[in-house]
Amino acid sequence: MDANLLRQSLRLGLSILITCAIAQHFQRITYLWYPLLAVITVVDDQDENSLQAARGRILGTAVGGLVTFLVHTILSGWIGILVSLLITIPVLRRMGWSSGLSTAVVVTVMFLGIDAYTKLNWSYVFNRSLDTLVGIAVALVMGRLLWPKNRLARMQELHQQLEASLQQRLEAHSAALMGEGPPPAAINAEAITRQLLELQRLINVENNLGERQARTLKRLRWPQRMSLWRCLQVRWLLVERLIQRVHQELGPNPLPELSHYLSAHLNGPGAPAEALRLESSGSALALPQRIALEEQVTRFQRLIRSQQLLNRVQP
């Protein structure tokens, strides 16, 4: 079972249980679906779990309720919902409360979707907004207490996983080209792309949280790392295809020059960065294939060396 899915399910279940317990104890929440929908919305979106994001959610929800109340006195139905959203969304973005957009939209739709919404009054708006804020508060507290997300640690974990995958692939290819083992199976490009997309998403979220988080990212050189990984991904997949073709054409015949060049990165960033030369290999490779290998593998190796040098830089 996916550990992250299990944690998310437990977090959601406990948040709903506590919200229902609060509603049962105080007996002031008339419509339980308001706080429960808020719980589901907030727990499902836990990327921004800072205090600033929590404040944005609370204030954004309050603004959404206020705008909806004012609009319903003029317009009704879906037109009223549309106009409310056209006012609410720019206001929240202008005030820096974008984290409250999801719950503000929920409040808008539910307020104008109730039976006899033309009788909407200040008492209803205040009480239902307060009910929604109860659900938001419970979800935010549970999100910070139960397995809070550490984006920087997750980014480092993804970075190390990608490096380990790269090293394993190069070691396997190097051994096969030396005639010491079978060639590895085709690379799983989908898994690599998925990890890189998650890494980019985490960087974007962290960068949008404020100046302090953005400075931390720059200090740890995450924008540079991500830029290198984007270049490495393209070159990595291209080199994999070229080497797989070499395995198919040469079979068990070794190609030690290419093997030594691929394994050179294991010596660390001090490894030589000169261009690959296969003229004296005596292999049966066609000239265009040899030129493509020399050029692409050389660029690939230099990108790996740049990544290693960047890893050695102390923040």
Image (cartoon, rainbow, N blue to C red):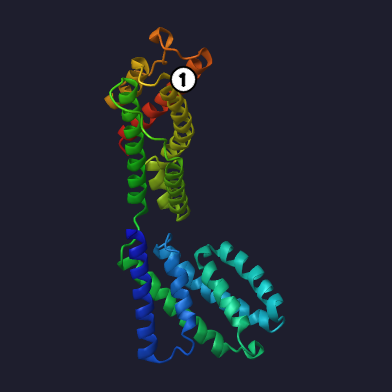
Query: Residue visible at 65% across and 81% down?
Result: 70
The residue that appears at 48% across and 19% down in the rendered structure is 295
- Looking at the rendering, which quadrant does residue 12 occupy? bottom left
Dot 1 surroundings within 10 Å: few (below 14), some, or many (20 or more)? many
Residue 314 percent coordinates (x, y): 30, 36
| Residue 196 shows in the view | yes
Residue 206 in the image: above or below residue 175:
below
Q: Residue furthest front?
A: 251
For the residue pair 154 and 313, the one nearer the viewer reads as 154
Residue behind mark 1: 293
Q: Nearer the viewer, residue 47 or 162?
A: 162
Along the line of sight, the residue nearer the viewer: 256 or 37? 256
Name above or below for residue 120 compared with residue 227: below
Position of the C terminus, as image quadrant, is: top left
Query: 300 or 71: which is nearer to us?
Result: 300
Tell me what residue is drawn at x 52 percent, y 65 percent.
97
Residue 260 x, y percent position in the rendering:
32, 19
Provide residue 175's location: percent of width, then percent of height. 30, 25
Left or right: 208, with 113 as reference point:
left
Residue 268, visible in the rendered structure: no
Q: Is residue 197 above or below residue 306?
A: below
Query: Which structural element holds mark 1?
Result: helix
Quadrant of image for the N terminus: bottom left
Instruction: Give residue 248's position: percent from left, percent from top.
Output: 43, 24
Q: How many labels sit on residues?
A: 1
Q: Amino acid at mark 1?
A: Leu
Name the image quarter holding residue 226: top left
